[in-house]
Image (cartoon, grey):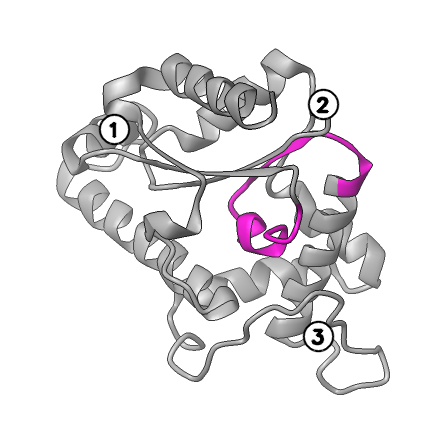
Amino acid sequence: MKNVVVTIARQYGSGGKTIAQMYAQKHGIPCHERDILRLAADDSGINEALFGEVDERLKSGSLFGISKKIYTIGDLIPPSSPDFTSTQNLFNYQAKVIRELAEAGPCVFIGRCADFVLADKPNVVSVFVHAPKDYCLEQARERTAKNVGDLSKFIARTDKFRGDYYRYHTGHEWNDAKNYDLCLDSSKLGFEGCVEAIEKYIEVRFK
């Protein structure tokens, strides 16, 4: 199958984003992450800044304890509703963009619960990239000026946010292997090895 879409969720410092970009570049296909916010803003007419502000509010944890807002396909709130710019609807528009991009052709998605949003698509391969704490810390240290203590806390907060965000919008646990087709330890395989593992999985599954 040529039209394979890959979704990659990842622990901070595991190199999941780099692996996604490497796979996309190797196969000459788009890699989507933050651009989804801009495309969702263009599609909805909602200011792009609101999408970023919601992410920051979610990071504070102030919304996660209220209730889950599990995404349902096609669930868009009309502009006439007072909930048009709600957290739920901003995610709905991101999901709409993700589904449209996946329909347009092969591509890679980083985060954004793309695996859940596209769970009904037979051509989607969902991947979770993880690694031991020390490895993630070492990888993160190479890209930041934070001291080790602060960096360790930053990694823990980031992964907690990703888990909370995923649970809030999907009702599932972000780091549960059952949610993914493939779980890869980047510390054992290396980045190139992870790319090769994804390719081999696709080769076997869609032969």
Q: Nearer the viewer, residue 32 or 113?
A: 113
* Residue type beneath disc 1: Arg
Residues at marks 2 and 3, CA–CA distance in whole angstroms: 37 Å
* Kind of residue at disc 2: Lys
Q: Nearer the viewer, mark 3 or mark 1?
A: 3
Q: Is residue 199 left or right of residue 36?
A: left
Q: Residues within 10 Å of mark 3 (few under 14, many from 20)?
A: some
The residue wearing badge 2 is 2
Picture quarter with the C terminus: top right
Horizontal side of 30 relative to 152 (left or right) equals right
How many residues crowd around disc 2 within 10 Å: few (fewer than 14), some, or many (20 or more)?
few
| Upstream in sequence: badge 3 or badge 1 | 3
Q: Residue at x 72, y 41 (%)?
A: 102
Residues rendered magenta in the picture: 103-121
Residue placed under numbered mark 1 in the picture: 141
Name the mark nearer the viewer: 2 or 1: 2
Q: Residue at x 29, y 31 (%)?
A: 140
Q: Which mark is residue 85?
A: 3
Amino acid at dot 3 = Thr
Q: Position of residue 3 (x, y in %)?
A: 72, 29
Tell me the residue at 60%/68% (across/down): 71
The picture quadrant where one finds residue 106 is: top right
In the rendered image, residue 94, in percent from the top left (x then y), is placed at 68, 56
Measure how far apart labels 2 and 1 are at the Cα level.
37 Å
